C-alpha cells in the first residue's frame, strides 16, 4: 500500500530544527529539483536528483490542494511539513518561505523551492550553499540546485517545464529533471532520483492523495530507472482513477480512465494483462458486453493464470459463460 501524503499535527510555532551538522554527519543532499503545480488538474509535485543516497527520503514534500516543497543543500527537512502547513493556512509561497527562514539559524546553508496549488511560487538559495547554486521560479514552478556544473542546469529545467504544458505533471517533472541532467546536473555525478505527484483521491481506491510516488535510491544511472518507473506509475495512476470510478459507480468516467490506462499499458507488458482484465470489468459495468468479452479473453490469453480469478469473480459473472475455463476446458 502507498504511504499516505499526510502531515503531522504541527504546533503553532514554526521554529525550525537548525542545529549545525557534526563533523561525522553525512553530506548534505546537494541536488537539483523542481517543485511544481498544475492548477488545471489539481496536481502538485516534486522531482529531484542527486549524488546522494535515497534523496527521495529528504527533499520532496507535497499535499493535494496545498502545494509542494523541495528542501535541499544542508537540508532542513522540517521545511517540508511546516511549509505545507503554512501554505494550507493561506500564506503565499514567498510568505511561507520567509517564516521558515526566520526561524532557522542555518538558513545560509539551505536551499528550498515552494509552490502553492494555485501556482504561486518561491525559491531560495542561502549564501553558504556550495557553488554553483541558484534557482528560477515562475507561475506553477520553482527550480533550484546546488553543486551543479553551472546555471545551465536550472535554465534547461525551466525551459523544459515551460515547453511541456498540457502533459501530465509527472511527465513534465521527469522531462525537466532529464533536461537538467543532460545539461550536466550535479557536478559530483549521479546516484539517486525521485518523483512525487499528489492529487485529491489520487491514491489506491481514492483513499490518499499520492498519485505517483517513485524513487531510485542507489543506481549508477538513476534516470534510466526513474524513467521506467514513471512510465509504469503513470499507467498505474490512470488505472487507479479507473478503478476508483468503478468502485464509486461512476462507470462512464471509470471507462474513460481505464481505456487510457490500457492504451498506455501496451508499452508496459508486465502490467498489461491485469489492466486489460479490469478493463473488461469496467466495460461490462458501463454496458459494453461485447467489449467486455473481448477484453476478458485478451487478458486471459496474456496471462492464463487469471482464469482462476475469472472463474469466481462476481464482476464478470454476466459473461463467464463466454470465457475460456480454467485449464482451457
Image (spheres, rainbow, N blue to C red):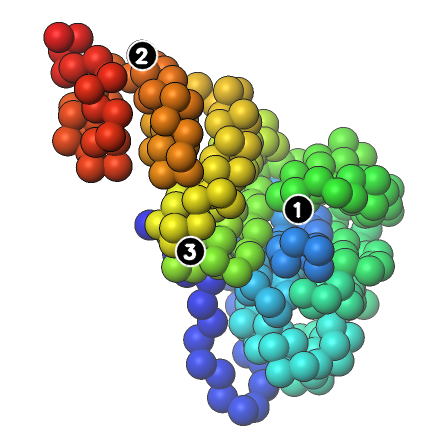
Closest to the observer: 96 or 185? 96
Pointer 3 or 1: first along the chain: 1
Q: In which quarter of the image is residue 90?
A: bottom right
**x, y (%) of residue 82?**
57, 76
Give neighbour class at mark 1: few <14, some 14-19, many 20+ (Cα, 10 Å).
many
Q: Residue 301 carries which label?
A: 2
**x, y (%) of residue 221?**
58, 29
Comparing marks 3 and 1, which lies closer to the viewer? 3
Residue drawn at x 47%, y 71% is 7
Pointer 2 or 3: first along the chain: 3
Residue drawn at x 61%, y 69% is 66
Identify the residue position indicated by label 3 in the image.
206
Could you give the CA–CA distance between mark 2 and mark 1, rounded to whole angstroms?
Answer: 34 Å
Vertically, is 31 above or below 118? above
Identify the residue position indicated by label 1 in the image.
169
Vertically, is 159 above or below 16? above
* Residue 305 in sight from this viewpoint: no
Amino acid at each position: 500500500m502507498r504511504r499516505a501524503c499526510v502531515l503531522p499535527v504541527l504546533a503553532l510555532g514554526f521554529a525550525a530544527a537548525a542545529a549545525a551538522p557534526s563533523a561525522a554527519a553525512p553530506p548534505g543532499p546537494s541536488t537539483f529539483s523542481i517543485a511544481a503545480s498544475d492548477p488545471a488538474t489539481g496536481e502538485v509535485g516534486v522531482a529531484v536528483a542527486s549524488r546522494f543516497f535515497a534523496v527521495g527520503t529528504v527533499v520532496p514534500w507535497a499535499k493535494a490542494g496545498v502545494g509542494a516543497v523541495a528542501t535541499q543543500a544542508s537540508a532542513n527537512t522540517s521545511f517540508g511539513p511546516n511549509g505545507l502547513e503554512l501554505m494550507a493556512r493561506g500564506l503565499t509561497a514567498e510568505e511561507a518561505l520567509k517564516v521558515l527562514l526566520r526561524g532557522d539559524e542555518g538558513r545560509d546553508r539551505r536551499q528550498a523551492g515552494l509552490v502553492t496549488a494555485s501556482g504561486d511560487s518561491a525559491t531560495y538559495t542561502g549564501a553558504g550553499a556550495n557553488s554553483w547554486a541558484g534557482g528560477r521560479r515562475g507561475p506553477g514552478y520553482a527550480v533550484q540546485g546546488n553543486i551543479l556544473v553551472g546555471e545551465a542546469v536550472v535554465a534547461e529545467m525551466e525551459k523544459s517545464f515551460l515547453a511541456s504544458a498540457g502533459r501530465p505533471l509527472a511527465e513534465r517533472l521527469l522531462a525537466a529533471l532529464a533536461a537538467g541532467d543532460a545539461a550536466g546536473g550535479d557536478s559530483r555525478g549521479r546516484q539517486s532520483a525521485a518523483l512525487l505527484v499528489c492529487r485529491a483521491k489520487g491514491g489506491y481506491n481514492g483513499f490518499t492523495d499520492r498519485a505517483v510516488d517513485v524513487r531510485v535510491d542507489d543506481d549508477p544511472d538513476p534516470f534510466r530507472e526513474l524513467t521506467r518507473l514513471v512510465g509504469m506509475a503513470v499507467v498505474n495512476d490512470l488505472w487507479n482513477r479507473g478503478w476508483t470510478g468503478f468502485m464509486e459507480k461512476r462507470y462512464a468516467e471509470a471507462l474513460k480512465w481505464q481505456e487510457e490506462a490500457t492504451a498506455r499499458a501496451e508499452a508496459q507488458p508486465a502490467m498489461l494483462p491485469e489492466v486489460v482484465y479490469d478493463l473488461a470489468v469496467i466495460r461490462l459495468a458501463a454496458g459494453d458486453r461485447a467489449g467486455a468479452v473481448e477484453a476478458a479473453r485478451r487478458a486471459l490469453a496474456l496471462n492464463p493464470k487469471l482464469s482462476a480469478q475469472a472463474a469466481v469473480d462476481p464482476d464478470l459473472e454476466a459473461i463467464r459463460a463466454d470465457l475460456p475455463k480454467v485449464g482451457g476446458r
